Amino acid sequence: MKKIFLGLVISCVMLFASIDFNKASKQELMSIKGIGQKKAESIINYRKTNKIKTVDDLEKIKGFGKTLVKKIKASTKS
């Protein structure tokens, strides 16, 4: 029940605010449409050595193309 509630809270937050890709947890990243476990892990690994300044910086990560980044940008309102 806690996981369901947490998921709902995170989803609501994602609808109304942009996400900080440098601080977001794996679960928060996975709540974004188009980002699953592998892509969330890729973001987390990338940000260990690089700062993500804009959503467009995600294109520098393997597996993130222009189309996906465009969809992420639209869904996070960044």
Image (tube, rainbow, N blue to C red):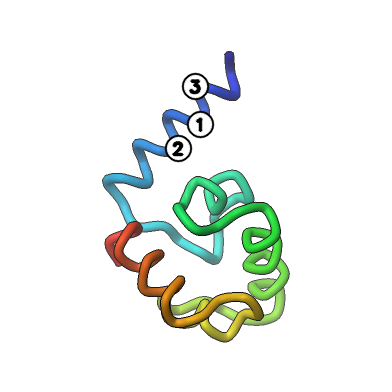
Count neighbours of disc 1 (C-alpha within 10 A) and say few if under 14, some if 14 to 19, many if 20 or more: some
Count neighbours of disc 3 (C-alpha within 10 A) and say few if under 14, some if 14 to 19, many if 20 or more: few
Tell me how far mark 1 sits from mark 2, CA to CA: 5 Å
Q: Earlier in the sequence, mark 3 or mark 2?
A: 3
Disc 3 target residue: 5
The residue that appears at 60% across and 50% down in the rendered structure is 25
Residue 20, image x, y percentages: 45, 61
**Circle 3/circle 1 CB separation < 8 Å:** yes
Q: Which numbered dot is residue 7?
A: 1
Tell me how far mark 3 sits from mark 1, CA to CA: 5 Å
**Circle 1/circle 2 CB separation < 8 Å:** yes
Left or right of 2 in this view: 68 = left
Left or right of 32 in this view: 71 = left
The local secondary structure at tag 1 comes to: helix
The residue that appears at 46% across and 52% down in the rendered structure is 32
Kind of residue at disc 1: Gly
Tell me how far mark 3 sits from mark 2, CA to CA: 9 Å
The residue that appears at 42% across and 76% down in the rendered structure is 67
Q: How many labels does the image show?
A: 3
Question: Is the residue 14 above or below the residue 20 in the image?
Answer: above
Question: Is the residue 76 above or below the residue 5 in the image?
Answer: below
Kind of residue at disc 3: Phe
Q: Which numbered dot is residue 21?
A: none
Question: Is the residue 5 above or below the residue 33 in the image?
Answer: above
Location of the N terminus by quadrant is: top right
The residue that appears at 64% across and 72% down in the rendered structure is 47
Disc 2 target residue: 10
Residue 61, image x, y percentages: 62, 80
Q: Which of 67 and 39 is in front in this view?
A: 67
Kind of residue at disc 2: Ile
Q: Which of 57 and 20 is in front in this view?
A: 57
